[in-house]
Amino acid sequence: MSSPSSVRRTGTLAELALLLAATMSVAQTSGTHTLYQRLGGYDFIAKFVDTAFPRVATQPQLHRLFVGHSIDSQMKQRQLIVDALCQATGGPCIYIGRPMGPLHDGLHITDSDWTEFMKIIDGTLVELKVPAVEQHDWNALFEQKFRPDVVEHTAK
């Protein structure tokens, strides 16, 4: 016989599954597609990360942000980036990393750093032949969701 707490957990999982199924059904029947779907899903996001982020890590102005990480740490960071982008674009992934603000706090990432980063992002989108509408939406996502917590704002 199940304990009340396990019944409650099972009920919660069942409710979550129903909610997820209903959300997916609405998205499919309404004719709207998430950015995740329009880009090509997980495979696109993984390819994008595997193409863009080694370039970010070796860009002279940004290199300082990636020094001193073991191969194991780099692999974990790669997966966290994929998961964060997957979730942020409306995909089924769950980002389990730390929030962007504390994660980047103290790195002194400037507007100039962000500009260099976005040049690589834009170039990768072009290289991967992402359509203009999706490029715009992808860049808007970076500007709205990630930039405020990544770029350090200094008091004047």
Image (tube, rainbow, N blue to C red):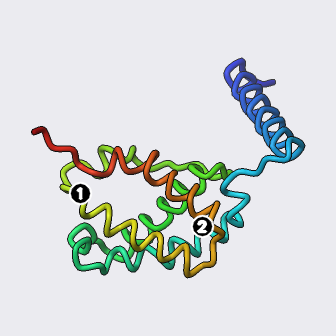
| Relative depth, front residue between 15 and 118 | 118
**Number of callouts:** 2
- Secondary structure state at the residue bearing disc 2: helix
Q: Which residue is drawn at 43% across and 51% down?
A: 143
Residue furthest to the top: 4
Q: In this view, does 81 lie above or below 22?
A: below
Q: Residue at x 22, y 57 (%)?
A: 110
Q: In which quarter of the image is the C terminus?
A: top left
What label does residue 41 carry, if any? none
Do the numbered discs 2 and 1 sit on residues whose CB atoms are within 8 Å? no
Q: In this view, does 61 lie to the left or right of 37?
A: left
| Mark 2 or 1, closer to the camera | 1
Q: Which residue is drawn at 35% across and 67% down?
A: 117
Q: Residue 141 at x, y = what percent?
A: 51, 51
Q: Which amino acid does label 2 sit on?
A: Ile
Q: How far apart are marks 2 and 1 (CA)?
A: 24 Å
Badge 2 crowding class, 10 Å Cα cut-off, few under 14, some 14 to 19, many 20 or more, is many
Q: In this view, does 58 lie to the left or right of 48?
A: left
Q: Is residue 5 left or right of residue 17?
A: left
Q: Residue 61 at x, y = what percent?
A: 22, 73
Q: Mark 1 points at which residue?
A: 109
Q: Quadrant of the N terminus?
A: top right
Q: Residue 50 at x, y = what percent?
A: 51, 76
Q: What residue type is labelled 1?
A: Ile
Q: Name the residue under label 2.
A: 45
Residue furthest to the right: 29
Q: In this view, does 141 lie above or below 66?
A: above
Q: Residue 93 at x, y = what percent?
A: 62, 52
Badge 1 crowding class, 10 Å Cα cut-off, few under 14, some 14 to 19, many 20 or more, is some
Q: Residue at x 56, y 59 (%)?
A: 136
